[in-house]
Image: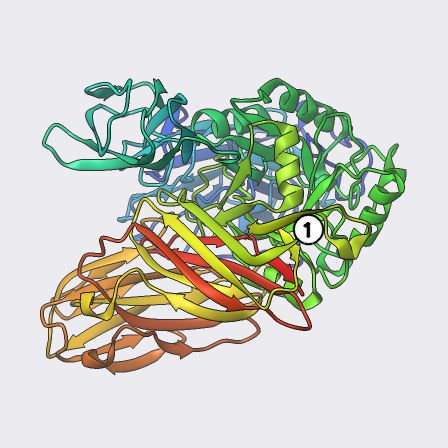
Amino acid sequence: MMDLDGAMHAGEPLGQGGANASGVLGQPILPEELGHVTLEPVGDFEAGSFQSFTLVYTAGKYGIDDSGSLRVCWRFASDQMHPQFDDPSRPNFTTITASNRAVLQYRYDPKGNVRPWDRCLAIKVVHGFLKEGDTITIRFGVRDQGSPGMRVQTFCEDSFEFRVLVDPIATFNFQTLPQQPVIRIVPGAPDRYLAVIPSERRVGQPFRLSLKGEDAWGNPSDKCAIRLFPKPDGPVAGLPDHIDLTQGQRAFHVDGLSVAEPGLVRIRFENSNGVTVCEAGPIRILREAELQPYWVDLHGQSEETIGTGSARQFFQFARDLAFVDAVGHQGNDFQITREFWNHLDELAAEFDEAGRFLAIPGYEWSGNTGLGGDRNIFFPNEGRVLRRSSHALVEDRSDIDTDCNTARQLFDALAANQEWDVVCYAHCGGRYADIAIAHDGRFEKSMEIHSSWGTFEWLMQDAFRLGHRVGIVANSDGHKGRPGASYPGASLFGAIGGLTCLMLPELSRDALFDCIRKRRHYATTGGPGGRPIVQVTARLDRPGALFHDDPKLGPAQSYPADTAMMGDIVQTDAVEVTFSATIHAAVPIERVDIFDGLELIETLRPYGQEELGARIRVMWEGAEYRGRFRQVIWDGTAHLTDNSIARAVGFNFFNPDRSLTQDSAQSVHWRGLTTGNIGGFDLWLADPYAGTLKIETPLVKAGVPIEEIGFEDEVFDRSGDLPRYLKLFRLPDANPHRDFSFTRRIPLRQAEDTRLFIRVTLEDGTLVWTSPIYLIR
């Protein structure tokens, strides 16, 4: 591999919200004089498949001078394999040659150009030059000596672009060619099927069943060809005998279903051989329900900023293919032009339909962490002021007077302009929110503690330490055009995008904003098992004063109450409360942790020690630090002595690149990473108690006798600034517990808030957090 000398200085005019980062004004060379580029083959290519491409740049009027350069760039969100130039037998072997034998130096730099076209193959002419008509030929995925080819990105895109820029006069002023090569990334065959129904309805209230197949990378597939036979565990009116999923469609719906009696219903779907391929539910049917659960993803981006696909496709996917009830577009403010801001308003107004689907206006205030860090800003209506953290990639400076460069300035501006209807979340993406620098509870109602970037419980822990009374949410922060069903693919994103369940009296913007202000919601890490029903209550021995607004922040109305739900703030002279929770999940429940703020009160499991069997769980969790490069690598091996492995199954291995492999009856190996979230695997052993399990990972090397692995966790703690640990424990061979309820008496703190919430861990690796109930003595 050859390297470029010196630093690479980005400098292209961007289309949506772009600026010429080289500082050169205008276009020094006419677009038609820059040359042209061709790509072979073009057309449709399956997401995540291996292909070979030949890209040929033909020099224009000025050629390329000695030390001039060419760049081929891809979007930040793209996760196609990086070009490599050393091993012709490995994936993505790439060759680069000049037709006149000029000497070229080249390298791949994931941050080598202006965002969103960050990913950059940089080519420099270092000996000789190109004249008009000379060519540079790049062969991606050369298969001549055994390479399988180049793996294209793992998510769908109608116009995947190989964006070519040229610096013909060696001034480091890169210009974009007027015509760019484009291919289409399409879904593969279905690898799994998913079925979704609402989490709750009243008796006789109609609801929709939605189904889809997803390929190995999580893309809704249009190649389904299967007949499914519904098998409900209770009568469901309107449910057909069978449902045909046919090619050409990516989603299938059955409307007008209802249930006539209270209860809990799940619907299994079998294929023609009687094998269960997916399940919908659970759905809870009640005679009366003041509040009902609705599932939302309020945080994602499209290609106009740093995501994939158009903003229109963003809203369409959430509604039609992710089957969520509401979505919010949250583009980086420093990339949003006034034209795009107006377009987002138009789309939000168009897609918003009370009772069916909500589209929430807003943006991501994207200040550097030292200035307060990322915040999500939500408006209940269109036509609002965009207060940017900067104009970094916006050329039009006519509205720069509305910029708020720090989070403190942002909150002050909202207050000064009486924008009390605005709500905000603190979140962690590339930049992270530092709520010690700035927080205003009048606007900032919750902490986003999970997204595609990972899991960030430390953000909520910061809020507890600082005494803030906020809720817990999770969203996707998706960049791959799949809001509401955001898989990480093969990139630096280490988790499935999260979802938040809002408790609403109706599906409307007013109800949604009221819910967020009252913190009446819970968060999940998303995924196929990520829509459980969770209810928590605190019952007081005698009535207290219930607040929806934090009385620390100013005058707040209160209501007499002897029961509180998630998010409520209650002032009481009680000494204890009765704390209760009920969970109904699609997959077995592994544990429930009860917290009072930072303190773990108790860990409950729905099974007892007498139910434990020959299944051992190995689980890892953690993040390196709070910033962008937080990945913890858990690649490793496990070896069993004096025993054998009957079966091995991984969880939270999110793509085929990182998986668990059983090598023999005694050993497994894996490739795994976490970004604050959890992952791991289960081993079913031939003998429940014989032998020793030896584990080796970059952080943990340990040997544990099997007989010592039991009900409680065996923890190997390698924490640094943030938790990083591996733990072992035993599970039932088959855990039947998908429903779990408990009640506990919990004493209240005397001098500070008692902050009660639960974290639920499901066997498939899904996590759930309820917003705290704040009890004030």
Tell whether 589 sits left or right of 111: left
In this view, the residue in front, 570 or 220, is 570
Task: Please state the horizontal and vertical placement of residue 21, each as a whole percent of the image.
Answer: 75, 43
Q: Say whether residue 537 is left or right of residue 124.
A: left
Q: Is residue 589 above or below residue 341?
A: below
Give the residue at mark 1.
Answer: 374
Amino acid carrying label 1: it is Asp
Other residues around mark 1 within 10 Å, as few (<14) / some (14–19) / many (≥20): many
Nearer to us in this view, 93 or 219: 219
In the rendering, at what x and y percent does residue 390 appear?
A: 79, 45
Q: Is residue 115 visible?
A: no
Q: What colouring does the structure picture have?
A: rainbow
Q: Residue at x 30, y 43 (%)?
A: 143
Q: Is residue 526 above or below residue 58?
A: below
The relative height of residue 640 versus residue 364 in the rendered view (above or below) is below
Instruction: Determine the residue located farthest toward the front in the rendered image.
Output: 542
Whether residue 7 is visible: yes
Residue 316 position in % (x across, y down): 51, 24
